[in-house]
Amino acid sequence: MTFVRTKLRLERMQPGETLRVRLRGGEPLRNVPRAARDEGHVILGIEQDGDVHIVTIRRA
């Protein structure tokens, strides 16, 4: 479900824009970056802020 929300947001963005996604737990952290890459987007970074990871994605 997390990637579905991320994908919908990315679809509303212009190419080159960036999106920061806050993720909790191991499964979303594995699946969201992988799925974004599979769709051609670029993962600019993954930061940890306590128990939350922030993934920065640049729209293709």
Image (tube, rainbow, N blue to C red):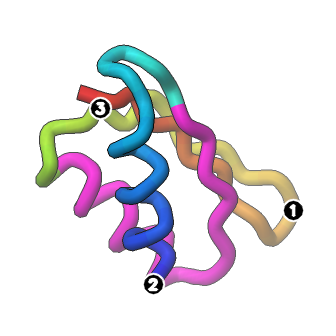
Judge depth for marks 3 and 1 and give the one in front.
3
Numbered tag placed on residue 42 in the rendering: 3
Say whether residue 35 is left or right of residue 29.
left
Q: Is residue 49 magenta?
A: no
**Given contact means CB atoms under 8 Å apart, are the residues at marks 3 and 1 in contact?**
no
Q: Say which quarter of the image contains residue 46.
A: top right
Q: Is residue 36 magenta?
A: yes
Bounds of the magenta span? 19-37
Tag 1 residue: 50
Q: Amino acid type of disc 2?
A: Met
**What residue occupies the far right of the structure in this picture?**
50
Tag 2 residue: 1
Residue sitting nearer the eye, 16 or 37: 16
> x and y percent of residue 32 in the render?
39, 64
- Eyeballing the image, is 23 above or below 7? below
- Eyeballing the image, is 56 above or below 9? above
Which residue is pictured at 48% across the width and 50% down the height? Answer: 9
Which residue is pictured at 63% across the width and 67% down the height? Answer: 23
Tag 2, which secondary structure? loop
> x and y percent of residue 14 in the render?
37, 22
